[in-house]
Amino acid sequence: MAPSQIPVALFPSLQRIGNSWASDIQRYSQEVKDLYAPLHALTNNEAITVERNLAYGEDARQVLDIFIPAQVKNAGVVIFVHGGAFVRGAKCTTDSLYDNVLYWFARQGYIGVNVEYRLAPAATYPAGGIDVALAIEWVHNHIAQFGGNPKQILLIGHSAGGTHAAAYVFDPAVACFGKYLEALVLISARLKADVLPENPNAEGVRAYFGADENQYAEKSPLTYVANSSLPTLVVVAEFENPLLDVYGKAFARKLAEVRSAKPLLLEKAMHNHMSIVAHFNSSEDELGRQILEFWENQQQ
């Protein structure tokens, strides 16, 4: 796996949590958030202006936040879609998470966009992908007034947000196939629907994808990798929710086969399903730099 810059003070805790992660995901997820919150608080974000809860649709959850660096002009745009097992989660799940992801990119000179979307069971497949499509359309049409470049957009999805981001790029039920995007990054994404016994979020999968397991394959991003040539980077943690790493690696391999290219896959040592995004805007920026390098390589 790729080397890590995890702070020495956090290493023992993340090692302990990682070895036990799958046994109690909710407990350890909260512990990871608590570990990183003090590091987020140490970062100076005063130069970043945040515009909150701008509506991209009619539903109360169809809103987004924009993170704007000082004196920015024609900057690249990073859109982030949070997770939550399809039935929970928010763009600001704590005082610092997931703002931390967009603050980090804004501190590098990019416009950050943090997207909230409708949840199951009220909004079922393919509603998440459709909400991502609506948000991207809004960003493309409006981001210039905030200093962003509508022709330079990177989409990042984490966990269930990664499912929805992948649906925007690959799924014919959404039928956008990466429109307006330069690249896609899928972090710890659920790329295959399943309700197997080892899946701790099986009920969330049922709530979003429906009770008929026979339809799961045709609703899974893994089925549609040939539908788009958009450059796509897959990132997985060493300690993942069960099977998400397996599905992520399978997705990367299948993409590589279709495109006759080397798999674009990063495996982050010592990280778990939550720390892989919670670490942004702390002293660790290895993954952020790798994502920017990947994106910049697509612009050459």
Image: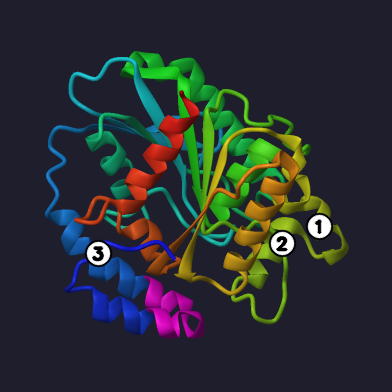
Look at label 2 and name its amino acid. Answer: Ala
Q: Is residue 300 above or below residue 264?
A: above
Q: Are marks 3 and 1 in contact (CB under 8 Å)?
A: no
Q: Are marks 1 and 2 in contact (CB under 8 Å)?
A: yes
Q: Earlier in the sequence, mark 1 or mark 2?
A: 2
Residue 167 visible at all: yes
* Label 1 residue SS: helix
- Judged from this view, the residue extending furthest toward the right is 214
Crowd rating for badge 3 (residues with CA inside 10 Å; few <14, some 14–19, many 20+): many
Q: Is residue 270 above or below residue 101?
A: below
Q: How many marks?
A: 3
Mark 1 to mark 2 CA distance (whole Å): 7 Å
Q: Nearer the viewer, residue 118 or 69?
A: 69
Q: Which residues are magenta?
A: 18-29
Q: Residue at x 63, y 65 (%)?
A: 204
Q: Residue at x 71, y 45 (%)?
A: 126
Residue 193 is tagged as 2
**Residue 249 quadrant:** bottom right
Q: Is residue 247 left or right of residue 66?
A: right
Q: Is residue 183 magenta?
A: no
* Label 3 residue SS: helix
Crowd rating for badge 2 (residues with CA inside 10 Å; few <14, some 14–19, many 20+): many
Q: Is residue 201 above or below residue 75?
A: below
Q: Position of residue 290 (x, y in %)?
A: 38, 46
Q: Mark 1 sits on what residue? A: 217
Q: Is residue 21 magenta?
A: yes
Mark 3 to mark 1 CA distance (whole Å): 36 Å
Q: Mark 3 sits on what residue? A: 36
Residue 207 is tagged as none
**Residue 52 quadrant:** top left
Q: Earlier in the sequence, mark 3 or mark 1?
A: 3
